[in-house]
Amino acid sequence: MFVLTFVLLLLHTTDTWAFSVTTSTPTVSVPENQGADLKCSYSADFGNPRIEWKFKNLQGSIGLVIYGGKPTAKYVGRVELYSGGLRFNKVTRGDSGDYTCEVSSDQHFAEAKIQLTVQVPPSVPVCRIPNSVTTGTKVMLSCFDKDGSPPCTYKWFKNKTPLPEDPSKFPAFKNSTYTLNPKTGELAFPMISKLDAGEYYCTASNNMGPDKSCSPVNLAVHDRNTGGIVAGVIVALLALALLAFGLWYAHRKGYFPSEFTKRVRVHLFSYSKPQVVYQPSSDYADEEDGSEFRQKSSFVV
């Protein structure tokens, strides 16, 4: 009984580890411009396998690092394949992403994945903050740092006071209606009010260096100018009335050519006065008196 149990356990263990690929470094984080080792080992039953390394960057694009036992053109001089895995002589911020070590033989295949993070401190973020907005409108403030790795998180300040992610939990911000996303850097006001006016700026951080902030911008919130809109409509109507009066006056004084006057009269009265055109035949003969009358013109009523 003991021997049978031992044999079954041995078979189970052998099956578990047969044709396996493992890594002792599933996550690697190193500063930019330093070297890095991505370790990958495989079981002996692969014999002399084919080894390939693939890379998926942070944008989702996939490419080959090692193919046919050699680095691809993009990685020549920067990486090398050694017995323990893949070695970078110097990493750049573009090397951050997921690496896959693929080991295959004629009948078997296995792989191991490694995540590489190249440490890059924050740079000054790009902030988009309007100078002036109207009450009741939706307003979006944005903040983004393209260099920081790992990706930065963002914090917004109003009048040098940090804005909490959830304003409802703080008495000083209980009347605020904004939403803040620290991962994307977006600060949104669904319906901005005068209480939201102030000086705003954003800070980017990722614990790889000192935090960086954009320059403060004063956001002014103004009431909707209803009086100006009404005044604009009145001015437009007055302009149309003056134009119509000018045309009428010029017509009365005979300033327009007769042909133009006729066209204007036709356009103005075509819908109120019907137009009848009498066009007799070109030749008409009176048989009784023997005289002949030839029509020379049309009659318009």
Image: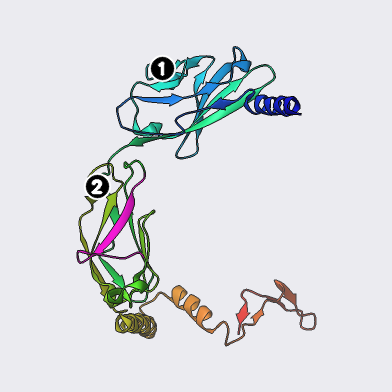
Quarter of the picture holding the N terminus: top right
Residue 222 in sight here: no
Q: Residue furthest right?
A: 287
Residue type indicated by callout 2: Val
Residue marked by disc 2: 124
> In the displayed structure, does residue 218 sit left or right of residue 270?
left
Instruction: Give the labeled residue for mark 1.
Output: 76
Pinpoint residue 177: horizontal percent, then vertical percent. 37, 73
Image quarter of residue 240: bottom left
Pick the front one: 289 or 272: 272
Residue at 34% in and 41% down = 149
Query: Which residue does the image show at 53% across and 79% down from the upper left?
Result: 266
For label 1, the crowd category at 10 Å Cα-Cα, with few meaning under 14, some 14 to 19 and many 20 or more, is few
Give the amino acid type for the residue marked by disc 1 in the picture: Val
Query: Which numbered disc flags the more N-terminal residue, 1 or 2?
Result: 1
Is 155 covered by the magenta stretch?
A: yes
